[in-house]
Image: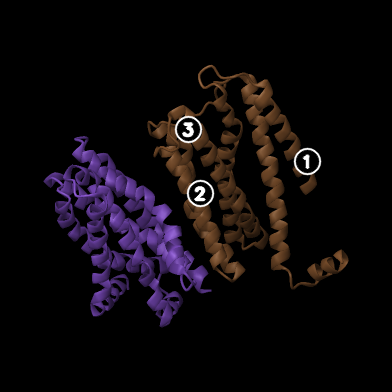
Amino acid sequence: MFLWIIQRDLLLAMRRRSDVLTTLFFFVIVVSLFPLGVGPEMAMLRIMAPGVVWVAALLASMLSLGRMFASDHLDGTLEQMLLSPQSLPLLVLGKALAHWLVTGVPLVLMAPVLGIQYDLPGDALLVLTASLLLGTPVLSLIGAIGAALTLGLRGGGVLVSLLVLPLYIPVLIFGAGAVEASTAGLGAGAHMSLLGAFLLASLVLAPWTAALSLRISME
Amino acid sequence: MIPLFSIAAILLCAAGLYIGFFVAPTDFQQGEAYRIIFIHVPAAWMSMFLYVVMAMWSGIGLAFNTRLSSMIATAIAPTGAMFTFLALWTGALWGKPMWGTWWVWDARLTSELILLFLYIGFMSLQAAIDDPRRADKAGAMIALVGVVNIPIIYFSVKWWNTLHQGASVSITQSPKMATTMLTGMLIMSLACWMYAIAVVLIRTRAVILERERHTVWVGELQGAAR
């Protein structure tokens, strides 16, 4: 059932490829805007790069949250899922994972290219990609809670950002911090461990919370 | 209850301010500017404490499906947000002469700012949902999720080496400040307590009346008022 959900969501995403690409291009455009805004000085860009890439990843991941449950809610599939005897947190975990595969993984793959644009050295690129790999699933998992709570509300898109962005801040701090620590020669180990801890904690807690929120929103 | 707490709040506030401005000595390091702690510290305490209380009432409302506890949580949120804003604002006013800057991005300031965002998120989520029961429950979820931030604020000065100084007052050790200053601060925090209780009770009453406006007893109250 769990795999089936992932398969189904991936299939749906493949049928509507433009949605996936929109998110990815949004990420690329936001990151590319910064050098135009603050000026193309390489020394400054190198310092800013991890923060800019991470903030853009946060926004891109958040923008696509609306799709996580909305279309299923509209055509009634979500109601069937809630009625089904399967465990709802597991279903939510499947949906969050599919969301990550569709939006998070392309961001991770794209990040090294954008890092090169910002003239990051090789090992910093590696740390940036690794930190995004650990951090973006957390974004999808926490985002599932926000998406579930704002399901079917008017102005849900703006509201979800207000709810979810404060919760994203720790991931942003330690994700961007990992790259800064490694370029400063401190080693990214501590930051990476914390990101891993966030991932494990949100893997356990977020599906359960999001499932409860879905029940609240659907009753 | 409400007049009692209101009067207590006014009296304690007057006493606290009197001690704060006229009795407490000038600090030899910080000069007169330290006097902002008489409002800054109580406001910061209240901002964290009210969030915990709000999350607790939300949790009770969610677990036992009681309507009144959710209403209290709704009533607490604006007061909590007000105290959070006050703590940030007075902190900025103090930071300018002491640190030479209105704002620094250190752990305690940032986490207190996140707390303000959480309050705002809670209130706007509840405002966006028309069905009051769903609003209560959805708000409760977000309040409970956000409660992880409270220990982060509280321990931020210990966990990270920050510009914001560590706690000057604790239960286990003797305070690191003059007694008159401490008395003034504690009286001010009592005043903030009384104010918060009074305002929350008033707002809860308003919430109850608003939600029950179609019932007979509210109609009778209105009739009696006329």
Q: Which chain is purple?
A: A
Spatial CA span between label 2 and label 3: 19 Å
Q: Hey, what amino acid is under mark 2?
A: Leu
Q: Quadrant of residue A26?
A: bottom left
In the rendered structure, which disc, 3 or 1, sits on the residue that comes first in sequence? 1
Horizontal side, residue B42 vs residue B162: left or right: right
Spatial CA span between label 3 and label 1: 32 Å
Q: Secondary structure at mark 3?
A: helix
Residue at the top extreme of this rendering: B28
Q: Is residue A73 above or below residue A96?
A: below
Q: Which residue is mark 3?
A: B95
Spatial CA span between label 2 and label 1: 28 Å
Q: Chain of mark 2?
A: B
The mark closer to the camera, 3 or 1, is: 3
State the residue at coordinates (63%, 29%).
B185
Residue B181 seen in the figure:
yes
Q: Hey, what amino acid is under mark 3?
A: Gly
**Residue B184, image x and y in percent?**
66, 27
Question: Pointer 3: residues within 10 angstroms few (<14), some, or many (20+)?
Answer: some
Q: Secondary structure at mark 2?
A: helix
| Quarter the C terminus of chain B occupies | bottom right
State the residue at coordinates (73%, 64%).
B209
The mark closer to the camera, 2 or 3, is: 3
Q: Which circle marks residue B7 in the picture?
A: 1
Q: Which residue is mark 2?
A: B116
In the rendered structure, which disc, 2 or 1, sits on the residue that comes first in sequence? 1
Q: Secondary structure at mark 1?
A: helix
Q: Chain of mark 1?
A: B
In the rendered structure, which disc, 2 or 3, sits on the residue that comes first in sequence? 3
Question: Pointer 2: residues within 10 angstroms few (<14), some, or many (20+)?
Answer: many
Q: Colour of chain B?
A: brown
Q: Hey, what amino acid is under mark 1?
A: Ile
